C-alpha cells in the first residue's frame, strides 16, 4: 500500500492551525508558512513534484525521504528490530523540509532547524536522514558528517546510523555499505561504489572537507559557530547540500544556537525573509503555566509515543519540589531557554527593572557607591555605580577588555557588545589599568556625593589601588583614603546577605538598571552555592560564563544597602 505522505503532512499542518493538535505559536507559524506557500502562484519552487533521477527512475523528493526512513529499523529499546514508523509531525518536518524544489529539482531548503525537547526521537530522526543523504540522495561521493561539540553527542547520532547498517544485511547489500571499525565509537561508514562516507565530527573540522550533509545535534552546546561555519562554507562543490540542526533548548543565549533560533523566529514571524531555512520550534507559549501537565504535549510532539505520562508526572513533581532541578527540567523537557541550569536570578524580573533611558547625570546629587572587580589582566574588568534616591537603587555599569581579547572571533558576544558600545577596549593584550585609574580618580574628585569605592583587591588590582591611593592621599589626605576606599573580599560571609537583599530589591521593584546587556549576561551566568547554614555564594558553571559584572554589582550593593545617610556606609571593617 502506497502511503500518501504529502496528505499526512498537510493534515498535520491543518490540524495544528485549527487547534486539533496542541501546539505553540512557532509550530503554528511553521504550519501556516507551508500552507501559504502552497497557494503561491508562479513561484520558483514546487512542492513534491515528480522528478527523474540519474538512472531514469521517477520519484517525488518528499516521498522518497519518508519512504527511505520507514525502511530503517530501531536499534534499541522495546522497538528494537521493528520498522521505524514516522509520526505525523515527523512526516511534516521531513516531507516539507525535503519536498520543496526549484525548477531544476534542487532543494529549496538548504537548512532545517528542529528544536524539540528530549525523548522525542530527534537524534534517531537525524541518524535516519544522515543515512538517506549518505546512501539514497543520489549525490555522488556524498560526505555526511554527524557533528557535535564532544564525542558523546556525536555518537548520539552516528551510533544508531552505524548500528542500523550493521543489523540490516539487506540495507548493507543494496547500497554496498562498508562498515569500518568494530564499534561505532571508533568506526565510520562508506560505500564501495562511489566512495561516499558518513563520519563523526567532533570540535573544529578541517577546511578540506566537501560535505553534502551536515548533521548538527545539540547545537546549543556549541560555544562558537566555527564548526557550523566551516561545514557550510564547504558546501560550494555540492549541488543540493543540506544542514540539519536538531537541538533542545540550552542556557547559552550568547552562543550560535540561540542566534540561529532568533533568526528562525524572525523568519516564522516574517520580520525577515529567508526561503532557504525551514524551522520549527516545539516549546510552550509565553504565559503558559508549566505546572499544568496538560500543557506539556504542546512542547512534546511524541507525547505518549516515545515519552509518556508517568515520566512527565515524575519530572513535574521533581521540578516543583527541587528548585535546583527546576531550570534544567524546564529547559530539557519543555524546551524553554534558560540563563543557567541553577540560576540565582529570575532574569525576567531583572529585565522588568530595565530602563535604557536612564541618564547617569541626573543622579549626581545623590549618594553613590562605586564597585569594581579586577579579574585577570586579559579578562573582563567591571565597574558598577549605584545611586540611592528615595530608597530606590539606580544601577549603571561599565566594562573593559583588551582589544585582542575583544576581537577574538570565537567570542562573538564580545564583538557585538564592543560594536554596540557596551564594552570599552584598549589596545594590546592586557587591560590598561592606568586608563581605569584615571577614570576612577576623576570620578571621585568630581562627584561630591561619592561615598565609597569598594573592590576585591586581588593580585591584578594591587598596582592600580596603590596608584589610586597615592593620588587621593596627595590631594585629600590619608583619612579620606581610609573612608573612601574599601577592600571587600569575595567571601560567603560578605556575599550571602547582600545577594539575598539584592534579589529582594529586584523582586520588590526597588532597583532600576540602565540595561547594559553585559551586566545582564553576567547575572544570568551566576549559580548559587549553599552552605550548611543556608548562606549563599555566587559562582559559575564553567569558565566561559563570566560573572565579573555580577560580583561587582554585589560588592557595590553590599556597601549601598548599609548606607545610613551619613558620609559613608559604616566602613568599620566589620564585613571585611
Image (tube, rainbow, N blue to C red):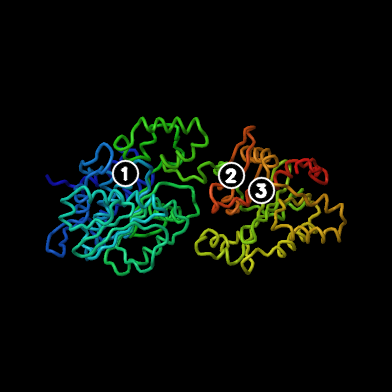
The quarter of the picture where residue 402 lies is bottom right
- Counting residues from the start of the chain, the first of labels 1 and 2 encountered is 1
Find numbered disc 1 in the image and state the secondary structure of the residue it sits on.
Answer: loop
Q: Nearer the viewer, residue 346 or 216?
A: 216
Query: Residue 335 location in percent, x, y?
Result: 42, 43
**Residue at the spot of label 2:** 350
Query: Horizontal placement of 514 versus 301: left or right?
Result: right
Find numbered disc 3 in the image and state the secondary structure of the residue it sits on.
Answer: helix
Image point (48%, 31%), residue name: 320
Query: Residue 394 location in percent, x, y?
Result: 68, 47
**Outermost front residue:** 182
Q: Is residue 484 above or below residue 507?
A: below
**Residue at the spot of label 3:** 553
Label 2 near label 3: C-beta < 8 Å?
Answer: no
- Counting residues from the start of the chain, the first of labels 3 and 2 encountered is 2
Query: Residue 405 location in percent, x, y?
Result: 57, 64
Judge depth for marks 1 and 2 and give the one in front: 1
Image label count: 3
The quarter of the picture where residue 447 lies is bottom right
**Residue at the spot of label 1:** 121
Please tell me how crowded label 1 is: few (under 14), some (14-19), or many (20+) other residues with Cα within 10 Å. Answer: some
Amino acid at each position: 500500500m502506497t502511503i500518501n505522505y504529502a496528505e499526512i503532512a498537510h493534515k498535520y499542518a491543518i490540524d495544528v492551525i485549527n487547534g486539533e493538535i496542541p501546539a505553540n505559536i512557532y509550530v503554528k507559524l511553521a504550519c501556516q508558512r507551508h500552507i501559504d506557500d502552497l497557494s503561491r502562484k508562479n513561484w520558483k519552487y514546487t512542492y513534491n513534484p515528480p522528478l527523474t533521477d540519474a538512472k531514469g527512475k521517477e520519484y517525488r523528493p518528499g516521498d522518497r525521504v519518508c519512504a527511505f526512513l520507514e525502511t530503517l529499523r530501531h536499534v534499541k529499546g522495546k522497538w528494537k528490530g521493528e520498522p521505524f514508523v514516522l509520526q505525523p509531525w515527523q512526516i511534516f518536518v521531513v516531507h516539507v523540509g525535503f519536498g520543496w524544489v526549484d525548477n531544476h529539482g534542487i532543494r529549496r531548503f538548504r537548512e532545517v532547524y528542529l528544536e524539540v525537547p528530549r525523548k522525542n526521537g530527534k537524534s534517531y530522526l537525524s541518524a535516519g536522514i544522515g543515512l538517506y543523504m549518505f546512501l539514497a540522495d543520489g549525490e555522488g561521493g556524498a560526505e555526511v558528517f554527524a557533528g557535535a561539540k564532544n564525542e558523546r553527542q556525536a555518537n548520539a547520532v552516528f551510533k544508531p546510523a552505524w548500528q542500523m547498517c550493521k543489523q540490516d544485511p539487506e540495507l548493507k547489500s543494496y547500497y554496498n555499505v562498508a562498515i569500518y571499525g568494530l564499534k561505532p565509537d571508533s568506526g565510520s561508514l562508506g560505500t564501495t561504489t562511489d566512495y561516499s562516507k558518513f563520519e563523526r565530527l567532533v570540535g573544529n573540522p578541517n577546511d578540506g572537507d566537501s560535505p553534502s550533509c551536515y548533521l548538527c545535534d545539540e547545537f546549543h552546546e556549541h560555544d562558537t559557530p566555527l564548526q557550523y561555519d566551516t561545514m557550510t562554507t564547504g558546501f560550494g562543490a555540492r549541488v543540493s547540500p543540506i544542514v540539519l540542526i536538531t537541538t533542545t533548548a540550552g542556557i547559552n543565549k550568547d552562543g550560535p544556537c540561540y542566534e540561529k533560533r532568533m533568526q528562525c523566529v524572525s523568519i516564522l514571524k516574517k520580520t525577515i525573509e529567508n526561503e532557504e531555512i525551514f524551522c520549527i520550534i516545539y516549546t510552550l507559549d509565553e504565559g503558559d503555566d508549566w505546572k499544568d501537565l496538560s500543557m506539556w504535549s504542546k512542547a512534546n510532539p511524541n507525547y505518549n509515543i516515545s515519552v509518556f505520562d508517568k515520566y512527565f508526572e515524575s519530572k513535574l513533581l521533581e521540578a516543583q519540589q527541587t528548585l535546583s532541578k527546576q531550570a534544567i527540567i524546564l529547559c530539557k523537557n519543555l524546551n524553554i531557554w534558560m540563563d543557567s541550569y541553577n540560576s540565582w536570578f529570575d532574569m525576567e524580573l531583572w529585565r522588568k527593572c530595565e530602563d535604557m533611558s536612564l541618564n547617569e547625570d541626573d543622579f549626581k546629587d545623590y549618594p553613590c557607591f562605586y564597585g569594581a572587580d579586577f579579574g585577570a589582566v586579559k579578562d573582563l574588568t567591571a565597574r558598577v555605580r549605584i545611586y540611592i534616591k528615595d530608597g530606590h537603587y539606580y544601577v549603571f555599569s561599565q566594562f573593559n577588555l583588551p582589544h585582542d581579547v575583544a576581537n577574538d572571533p570565537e567570542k562573538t558576544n564580545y564583538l557585538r557588545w564592543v560594536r554596540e558600545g557596551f564594552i570599552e577596549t584598549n589596545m594590546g593584550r592586557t587591560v590598561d589599568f592606568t586608563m581605569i585609574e584615571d577614570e576612577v580618580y576623576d570620578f571621585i574628585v568630581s562627584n561630591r556625593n561619592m561615598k565609597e569605592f569598594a573592590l576585591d583587591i586581588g593580585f591584578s588590582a594591587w598596582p592600580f589601588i596603590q596608584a589610586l591611593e597615592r593620588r587621593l592621599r596627595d590631594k585629600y589626605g590619608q583619612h579620606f583614603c581610609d573612608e573612601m576606599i574599601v577592600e571587600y573580599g569575595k567571601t560567603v560571609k560578605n556575599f550571602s546577605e547582600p545577594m539575598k537583599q539584592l534579589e529582594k530589591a529586584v523582586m520588590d521593584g526597588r532597583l532600576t538598571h540602565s540595561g547594559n546587556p553585559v551586566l545582564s549576561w553576567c547575572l544570568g551566568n551566576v549559580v548559587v552555592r549553599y552552605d550548611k547554614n543556608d548562606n549563599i555564594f555566587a559562582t559559575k558553571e564553567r569558565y566561559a560564563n563570566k560573572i565579573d559584572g555580577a560580583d561587582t554589582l554585589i560588592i557595590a550593593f553590599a556597601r549601598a544597602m548599609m548606607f545610613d545617610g551619613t558620609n559613608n556606609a559604616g566602613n568599620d571593617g566589620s564585613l571585611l
